[in-house]
Image (cartoon, helix red, strand yellow):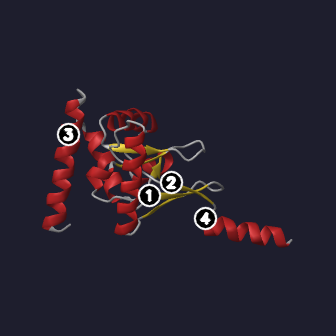
Amino acid sequence: MSGEDHRDSNALHVEAARRLDAVQSRYTTKRRLLVDVFEQADHPLSLPEVIAADSSLAQSSVYRNLAALEEAGVVRRIVTGDDFARFELAEELSGHHHHHLICRTCRTVADFTLPTAVERSLAATFRDVSDAHGFSVQDHQVDLLGACADCQDAARIGGDT
């Protein structure tokens, strides 16, 4: 890990501790381990994936700690429609604004980013809509639901027989 990565990781942990403190929760060793797992992940993780990433994490402990981290705004939940929600670092902590492709067949979740011009256009449109309804937008997320390439290939192969 470079000096800059170490500094960024420290800033992440300081902010996670601050957010937990704001909701009267402690930044325990297990919560810090979970933040480390999400910091290293390249996609939103399901509970089994979180546990697989660090064998010292027990399922019951992960459930409780994820709830506390979510309440504090350290992680956010992505609902995919299967038995497991996916979790990732809150966007403000990851520093990476992105959206999700969610496969309705296998439930994988992949991140994608939009060009800056498209993001600006979306933000302006969302502002117009929210203003018309007296709503205050704080953020947005876009999830595209469909079938991933692997599931499409499997359906084509299965359809040929």
Disc 1 to disc 2: CB gap under 8 Å: yes
Query: Residue 86, percent across and down?
Result: 48, 47
Q: In which quadrant of the rendered image does the C terminus lie? A: bottom right
Mark identifier at residue 55: none
Around disc 2, counting alpha carbons within 10 Å, would you say few (fewer than 14), some (14 to 19), or many (20 or more)? some
Query: What kind of element bears circle 4?
Result: loop
Please give left or right for residue 139 compared with residue 63 in the image. Answer: left
Residue lying furthest right: 161
Q: Secondary structure at mark 2?
A: strand
> Quick one: label 4 or label 2, which is nearer the N terminus?
2
Residue 127 lies left or right of residue 154; in this view the side is left
Q: CA distance from mark 3 to mark 4?
A: 37 Å
C-beta proximity under 8 Å, tags 4 and 2 = no
Q: Mark 2 or mark 3, which has the lower sequence index? A: 3
Residue 142: image location, x then y, percent = 47, 54
**Relative to 53, residue 42 above or below:** below
Say whether residue 153 is left or right of residue 41.
right
Name the residue rendered at 50%, 47% in the picture.
48
Image disc number at residue 143: 2
* Observer able to see residue 140: no
Label 2 to label 3, Cα distance in Å? 29 Å
**Sequence order check: which comes first, mark 1 or mark 4?**
1
Residue that label 1 marks: 99
Label 4 and label 2: CA atoms lie apart by 13 Å
Q: Position of residue 97 (x, y in %)?
A: 34, 58
Callout 4 amino acid? Cys
Q: Which numbered disc, 3 or 4, marks the residue that appears first in the sequence?
A: 3
Q: Which residue is mark 4?
A: 148
